[in-house]
Image (cartoon, rainbow, N blue to C red):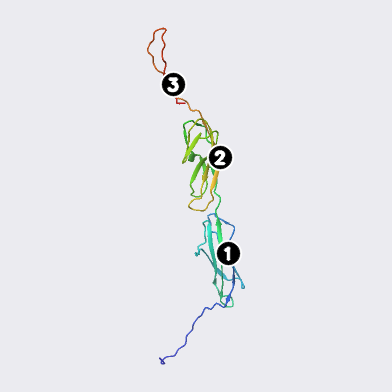
Amino acid sequence: TGNYTGTGDCNWSIICCTAIVNLGNLTGHTYNGSPQSATATTSNPSGLNVAITYNGSLTVPTAAGTYAVHGEISAPVDQYGQQWGGHADGQMTVALASQGPFTLAATASQTYGATLNLSTKLTASGSGNGAISYAIIASSSPSIASISGATLSTTTGTGWVDIQATKATGTDGNYNPATSNTMRVTFAKATQTALVFNPITPGVYGTTQTLSATGGSVG
């Protein structure tokens, strides 16, 4: 309005130069339950601070997966008071890990007609939360046994089957699928129930009688 005068200060942050941001440690990562980080350095000049984000987050990732890495100079003023800018983009992959021990224990011979809960034979169940399945990979004769879920049942005769378990990659997404050792299960003949003759009425010498019995097993 022409009635006042005054002075003041104004601070400007002007980036005058662009530095080179170099991203490193983007490869060779495997899930181990600990954070896996990239590195960032600057050149022309060196020594500037760089903030790194992973898929847009400052949190260093732990889980297996692929991450978009962005490095941005975060403290741009050098020792001479100059303002520097610069950024770089890359990609970092944390690979799936191998599962821990995943083994089936040896089992005693089973009798014909018996069932076996295969989950009770796991002495080490691997890693992660993947589903476990069981399969017959070899047998002494076709269709000697079958698997439903984790239950092994005989279907025909006696002999043997080789069983293998598989654990899939779980919803945690951190471990590769795993296959167990091979476990052989043999099937022996079952003991029949007692065989008992049925009573007969006294007969007359020289005539014939029909004998019958109950018990035993079909086959």
Q: CA distance from mark 2 to mark 3?
A: 39 Å
The residue depicted at 54 percent of the width and 64 percent of the height is 69
Q: Nearer the viewer, residue 191 or 49?
A: 191
What residue did someone put label 3 on? Answer: 195
In the rendered structure, which amino acid carries the disc numbered 2? Thr
- Where residue 32 sits in the image (x, y, percent)? 54, 54
Which sits earlier in the primary sequence, circle 2 or circle 3? 2
Disc 3, SS: strand
Disc 1, SS: strand
- Where residue 43 sits in the image (x, y, percent)? 61, 71
- Of circles 1 and 2, which is in front? 2
Marker count (numbered): 3
Q: Residues within 10 Å of mark 2 (few under 14, many from 20)?
A: some
What residue did someone put label 1 on? Answer: 39
Residue 182 tag number: 2
Q: Is residue 131 above or below residue 11?
A: above
Q: CA distance from mark 1 to mark 3?
A: 81 Å
Which sits earlier in the primary sequence, circle 1 or circle 2? 1
- Where residue 114 sits in the image (x, y, percent)? 47, 32
Which sits earlier in the primary sequence, circle 1 or circle 3? 1
Q: Quadrant of residue 40?
A: bottom right
Q: Residues within 10 Å of mark 1 (few under 14, many from 20)?
A: some
